[in-house]
Image (spheres, rainbow, N blue to C red):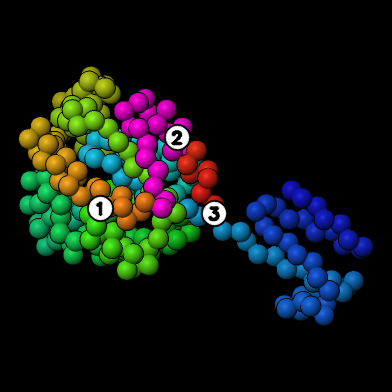
Amino acid sequence: LAWFAVPSMEVCAAAPTRVSVRTRKSCPSKRTTRMGLCLSTSAKPATKKIIIAGAPASGKGTQCETIVEKYGLTHISAGDLLRAEVAAGTKNGKIAKEYMDRGDLVPNEVVIDMVKDRLSQDDAQKNGWLLDGYPRSADQAKALEEAGIHPDLFLNLEVPDDVLVERVVGRRMDPETGKIYHIKFNPPPEEIVGRLTQRSDDTEEKARNRLATHHKNVDAVVESYKDILVTIDGNRPREAVFADIEKSLERVTA
């Protein structure tokens, strides 16, 4: 707490509030003290708008959990939005599933409205947002730009393809908790192994197809955000990866 003392008045301002004291004559709000002083306060913005990108299994999910835990941002995963549509059996969900099962990009018109709507919701506007896995093409980046959605920082995780394929084929999900495990790198407890599931697109063939699609599009996306781009080496322990991400986030001016 910071205390500002003036004759017959004390003003307590808890950061990050800005406090200004002016005379009655120059006070726009006409809210003055008995000493004729004007008190005007305004809240300092504290939200961040971040995009995180990377190939499938590059570690985005793990890093997103840590970012959200530390900074309180609203995590918005394009993949989760699409999978929710698939699970609900909607028209868009059925269309999306055909593309997702092949490892191809879902058409822009299916995704962009869902993403824009989610970014406009109250929690994302109040807390700031972390957009995970979108945009994945130059057209999608352009669609966000046209919608007036401008991130402060674009994080790109880079991991060699062979490492990514190994990560993908070993992934398993607990359908009861949604937690992701890996049979080699993050083994599940023995008692839940029997109920774990594997995503339909987590095979080597589909993983390599998704990587080919990713590489074909990522350069154009990175070019769209080159002025705010930070490339992170994702082929390291998660703590080391997050340390670099944290440094980049701390440099973002809220």
Which residue is disc 2 drawn over? Answer: 244
Viewer-closest of 132 and 144:
144
Give whichever of discs 1 and 3 has the lower sequence position: 1
Q: Is residue 20 left or right of residue 198?
A: right
Secondary structure under the numbered disc 2 in the rendered image: helix
Residue 116, x across and y down, in percent: 31, 63
Residue 26, x across and y down, in percent: 79, 78
Of tags 1 and 3, the one toward the viewer is 1
Residue name at image x 10 percent, y 41 percent: 209
Q: Start and end of the magenta stretch?
A: 227-246
Point out the residue furthest to the right here: 7
Disc 1 packing (10 Å; few <14; some 14–19; many ≥20): some
Of the residues shown, which amino acid type is indicated by label 2?
Answer: Asp
Residue name at image x 40 percent, y 60 percent: 150
Q: CA distance from mark 1 to mark 3?
A: 27 Å
Of tags 1 and 2, the one toward the viewer is 1
Which residue is disc 3 drawn over? Answer: 254
Q: Residue 11: which disc?
A: none
Residue name at image x 79 percent, y 66 percent: 21
On screen, residue 209 above or below 170: below
Of the residues shown, which amino acid type is indicated by label 1?
Answer: Ala
Quick check: can you spot residue 204?
Answer: yes
Secondary structure under the numbered disc 3 in the rendered image: loop
Viewer-closest of 174 and 234:
234
Give the number of marks. 3
Q: Which quarter of the image is occupied by the C terminus?
A: bottom right
Q: Is residue 244 magenta?
A: yes
Secondary structure under the numbered disc 1 in the rendered image: helix
Which residue is disc 1 drawn over? Answer: 220
Give whichever of discs 1 and 2 has the lower sequence position: 1
